[in-house]
Amino acid sequence: MTAEQISIGAGHDAEHTGTGVSNTKLAIWLFLSSDFLFFGAFISAFLLYADRTPAGAKQLTDELNIPFTSATSFILLMSSLTMVLALAAIQRGDHRRVRIWILATALFGAVFIGGQVFEFTEFVRNGYALQTSTQSSAFFVLTGLHGAHVTIGIIWLLSLWGLSSQGRLKTADAPKVELAGLYWHFVDVVWIVIFTVIYLITPLTQGTK
Amino acid sequence: MTTVSDAIPEVQESHRRVDLLQRPAKSTGWWSWFTTVDHKKIGILYAATSFAFLVIGGIEALLIRLQLAGPNGKVLTAAMYNQLFTMHGTTMVFLMGMPMAVAFGNYLIPLMIGARDVAFPRLNMFGYWVFLVGGLFIYSSFLPWNGGAPNAGWFGYTPLSSAPIGNGFLPGHGADFWAVGLVMLGIGSTTSAINFIVTVLNMRAPGMTFLRMPVFVWMMLVTAFLTLFAIPVVTGALIMVYMDRNWGSNFFNAAIGGDPLLYQHLFWIFGHPEVYILILPAMGIISEILPVFSRKPLFGYTVVVFSGIAIGFMGWGVWAHHMFATGLGPIAVSAFGLSTMLIAVPTGVKIFNWLGTVWGGALRLNTPMLFALGFIAMFTIGGLSGVLHSVVPADTQQTDTYFVVAHFHYVLFGGTVFGFFGGVFYWFPKVYGRMMNDRLGKWTFWILLVGFNLTFFPMHILGLEGQPRRTYRYGAGLGWDLMNRIASVGAFIIALGVLLLLINLWVSRKHGQLAGDDPWDGRTLEWSTPSPPPEYNFAEVPEVEARDDFWHRKYTEDDRGLLVRLPSGAAESTGPADAEAAHHIHLPSPSYYPLVLSLGLPILGYAAVYHALWLGIIGAIVLTFGAYAWAIEPPTAEEPR
């Protein structure tokens, strides 16, 4: 093996790595596993406070608009589909569709964020704010941090879209789309957990009281 | 062209790139320390910065011991005392212990597994800068206009740390600097953990199978996983504290149903693995030193490795033993008491394996070996006092007394720091090509051993007699005067030992005896490289055929099982003949952007502490610029054609 053939990081050439997975992909998996525990801290806080609001105070369940959030959640989950289509498009070199699907993914994400902004504004207008109760604190910080994750994902996608529009996202760059996709799917999966905990389980705990 | 992968997508066509900062090209000179991506240089930076924080944290400890040297001490006010013990703990855990382990890992992991660099050289540099600016950020709270340093303990228990600023529990911004600063340091630790894991999993030289890896690499791998999963939990807890203090959320507000114990759970789910994050690297270090200075392979290599992994797993199931006094109920308390007893098993297994390594060996009692043996002895004492805490009634009695202080200093000073110092003496010749003074080193060891035991052994007794921790003075006539006086004298003896070590380091760097490539007759791959190793580490990537591969290239056994030295040449380090090949090795190029990106963080930090939106916007701009410039810049600059 000559010196030229030896690469340091083995880069996108996954065959030369010990695990067979490229360095960047392994790194993003590790980051996501770490990030999951970050959400875990806030999800446990929310669960702890799910049924602790004193009887007189405003209850989260009275504020939740479950059909509305179900709709925006559905749109967010559908963005995972468009993300997969974007990756499939770049892998077969169809760059026009790459841009369409990436933009669609970012747009769906933006719709979800718009829904969250509307939800937050409505809650605060109704007098249910961060300071209201332990549950409201856990609700706003947990969903807010998830929203921040989605926003970062949108910025990431739009950056890829920008690169692609300038012709700087080649077919060989498919792993870059895949990385963004892994992050995006992760954010979706976390939302499934959060949605289940806040919008599906919490109303049940209130009903038993 | 071969390139290094990086965390952020890059673009190859340089002519389309807008170079906002002229790319640094030089890899020598003082300026190169700001832009280097060489894992060895970054390791040295980590070590030097950790030593600086060791001295700062040590001075804080000396002030504490001055105050406690006699009853009714008048050296410090209560407010100053609170800041000093908080910053002593925060410094020694986050700014000395963790980064010192990262220093060893950075320098040694690629050399030990036969790689040319870590997987993400620029991310590596970013981790260092975040550590430095995060440390400076927390310490900037001492500036008079910032209203005092953190003062709620290194663990920052709620509701003390989380009560809104306005209610007067903790006036000033200290607790905010603490919470935000630790989040920042967590970002740095996470990036270095990811980097280590990917490097170890993906970049081992051909033949370097998992069960041929040096134990130090194994322990750093376990440590990196612990860091990866522990840091996010405490980051969450710190964000809750910050939100409660600054923005009126109620996570820990007991008045309306908040649960301060939630914080303790989250903190110790991080905090107990953190203990192993601090001790496992040192265990790895002495597992390298003991075989070399006993001229025997490590006894029960596989068992040592799997014990380390077992500690890594079980470390997640013992956190509530920090909370026995909070009234968790008999079932939880029994379960955590049992798991705490159980985790002593793999730890004890390791101690016996180290003893088995030394047993019957041809011992050479140089300084690194003395520190390694000191580690075993002192860590055993610390481990035994630790097992006492699994006995819940005893623990309840000892909670918040000096007994606990004695226990964890035996583990973290007698263990971790002794391991680190042994490692410094052991690998210094590799880093600088010169030996540290062994005679002075032995003096250093004995002075530290005596000073350490004088300081911390009496604390066991003081604790059993009921002296409370974190209390700035004690009354006369309680029978604590003599023991406290002894501890304070011991602290200054430790300071003398550390001073001798620093002098030894400084002088040996330029004037030490020349070391050669393999001064200790080492066993692992780093000793097969020149001292100091070239930028590319290995001109030719080694093919590994055995555990302790380098040893087997030097020695074989005759019929009676005696060691026979192979003719030299087999073990020769890569010489100038390979310089031609080395010319073709593409190393990652230096970069400014890790530094730029990290500088955005303290700006955002100040914005968070002072609720300054304009500062937040500036920080976000710096961060965005750094991130995009980094993403667009290829890891390796194109060669001039």
Image: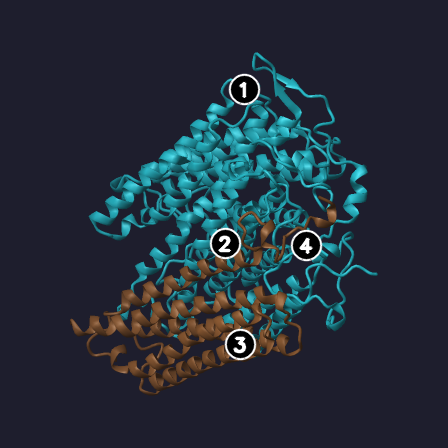
Give the residue number, with chain letter if any, for mark 1.
B361
Circle 4: residue type: Val
Measured in 3D between alpha carbons, the distance from the residue under mark 2 to the one under mark 4, in whole angstroms, is 31 Å
Instruction: Single out the residue that lies furthest toward the left.
Output: A209
Q: Which residue is mark 3?
A: A102
Task: Tell me, yes or no, if residue B504 can be seen here.
Answer: no
Where is residue B539, by image quadrant? top right
Numbered mark located on residue B37 in the image: 4
User: Is the residue at mark 1 from the same chain as the one at mark 3?
Assistant: no
Is the same chain shared between marks 1 and 2?
A: yes
Q: Chain of mark 2?
A: B
B128 in relation to B247, above or below: above
Q: Residue at x 65, y 30 (%)?
A: B440
Label 4, residues with CA under 10 Å away: few <14, some 14-19, many ≥20: many
Q: Is residue B625 left or right of residue B492?
A: right
Image coordinates for residue B323, horizontal then vertical, percent: 31, 50
- Residue B53 tag number: none
In the image, the chain rendered in brown is: A
Q: Give the colour in which the image draws chain B.
A: cyan
Evaluate whether label 4 is on the same chain as label 3: no
